Amino acid sequence: MVIAACIAALVVSAGDVPATAQDESPDDAGPPLTISWARNYLTIRGEHLPGEEVRILYIEAYCRANSQTTDWGKHTVVGHRTELLSASEDGTRIELRCTLRDGVTVDHVITAGADEIDFRLTARNPTIRRSEAHWAQPCIRVGAFTGLGDPANPQTYEYITKSFVFLDGELSRMPTRDWATEARYTPGQVWAAPGVPRADVNPRPLSSHVPSNGLIGCFGDGDRMILATAWEPWQELFQGVITCLHSDFRLGGLRPGETREIRGKIYLVANDVDALLDRYHRDFPEHHARSRALALERSARRRAFGGIEPRVSPDGSTIALSFQGAVCRVPSGGGALTRLTRGEGWDVSPAWSPAGDRIAFVRTRDLGDGDLLVVDAATGAPVALPAAIRARGPLFFHPDGHRLLGRLASPGGGARIAWCDLDDGAVTPVEGIPDSLATRRAPFALSAYGRWIAWAEHADRPGEQSGNNGPAAELWRVPGDGGAPSRVTV
């Protein structure tokens, strides 16, 4: 083990339509790659590659949620079988089908380009029950590629010194800062994707940091090449114990009859980190927009330009805010402020729809409860709602764009943390959240995929100021549609 010797991580600064495997590759990409699949291993071959081939356990496992602290074999693994449907004679295209034990099927179209492997997956749930499979693991063995593998010891750890993720916008070699060492199973390292519950990832040591993007990779023997991989949607990045790296894709528990498209890439390119990032951003524009939006929102909250409650649009291009009693928007990079609302009272708590075409907000006379309203994000034109709803922020759109979460009340009803159906105006309280949360200013939030609602509890003690001045904060969550609450922090 060299983990103790290399714990001081080396950090290196790194300088729109998703591309397909048929897109043109650079002229200097090198000889073409070929692929084959047998006995659950996908093998990439190329004479120019360090080690000449890269093997992938494909797919290692399909996994359940609530996996971070539970038994891998008894709880997490769903069970599946994979069959080869077709393989081209020239070794550039393979079709596979995975059939999960719960009836879900996942069809894989895998194509080799000059310097990448392209994955296009279609997951279907033909059953009448929701699938328990939330994520899956392609396990890339990188020992031969890095030159630091040991055929006699598949659990050698030297290779991590050539492996990397991106933290705070910079390429960070492993072991990264604040390297976690405790978990149900050790060693290894897991980084949960933004918005993914930390309870729903691999049961190896879980980093306290959220990656800046979805890339994980390593430098080849001699440092002339990079192997990197990414998926959309993605669940986690993972450095494993069998000389392997993972970007694990997300299924999310398919509903009965649901179909989901998933795509991924393995890049095998020259050692040019800036060029790799440019290509990754073109292939996965939603990853780039998401990381920019998070960075911009953090930045916007630090700026003192007179606006309050800034919210960044889904594509990261625009900030909505409340300014002098009106909802306005301003380009994220700076520019002219455009006023969207007019009327008596204070327009506060703006929230973007997932498509970025609408903004919901609350019109209040005293910065308390008020009327729930929606406007066109471009023009400020009112968007009609089917019923009158009282609200207090913050507000959150569901990813489907048809529901809105907030402290809500229909006429004559009491305020609750509830969903408003924007199609029929129905207000549905979220079961499992304390009623008192709707009458105080305790923070709460909706996760990125709409799966969880989290809030903070602050315990009061005799003789202390009531409210948010309790001696200790606890973080709780419930499923997005309600259910039994669970404590997140200990």
Image (cartoon, rainbow, N blue to C red):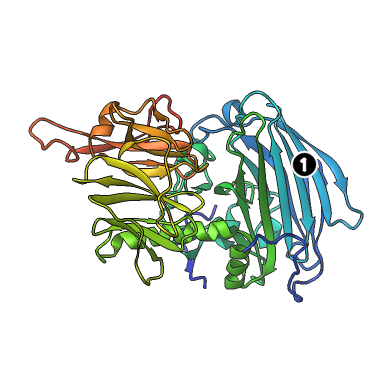
Going by the image, does 109 lie left or right of 451?
A: right
Eyeballing the image, is 124 above or below 382? above
Eyeballing the image, is 26 above or below 388? below
On the image, which quarter does residue 417 sit in?
top left
Residue drawn at the location 82% of the way across and 49% of the way down? 94
Q: Is residue 372 visible?
A: yes
Q: How many marks?
A: 1
Q: Is residue 489 visible?
A: no
Of residues 484 and 410, the one drawn nearer to the viewer in this rendering: 410
Q: Position of residue 51 (x, y in %)?
A: 75, 62
Of residues 179 and 96, the one drawn nearer to the viewer in this rendering: 96
Residue drawn at the location 28% of the way across and 46% of the way down? 363
SS at badge 1: loop
Of residues 76 and 92, the one drawn nearer to the viewer in this rendering: 92
Q: Position of residue 266 (x, y in %)?
A: 68, 57
Residue type for callout 1? Asn
Which residue of the protein is positioned furthest toward the right in this rendering? 89
Q: Position of residue 155 (x, y in %)?
A: 62, 47
Q: Position of residue 485 (x, y in %)?
A: 38, 27
Residue drawn at the location 50% of the way across and 32% of the way down? 66
Q: Residue at label 1?
A: 40
Which residue of the protein is positioned furthest toward the left in this rendering? 463
Residue drawn at the location 67% of the way across and 45% of the way down? 261
Q: Quadrant of the C terminus?
A: top left
The residue carrying pointer 1 sits among few (fewer than 14), some (14 to 19) or many (20 or more) residues within 10 Å by Cα, namely some
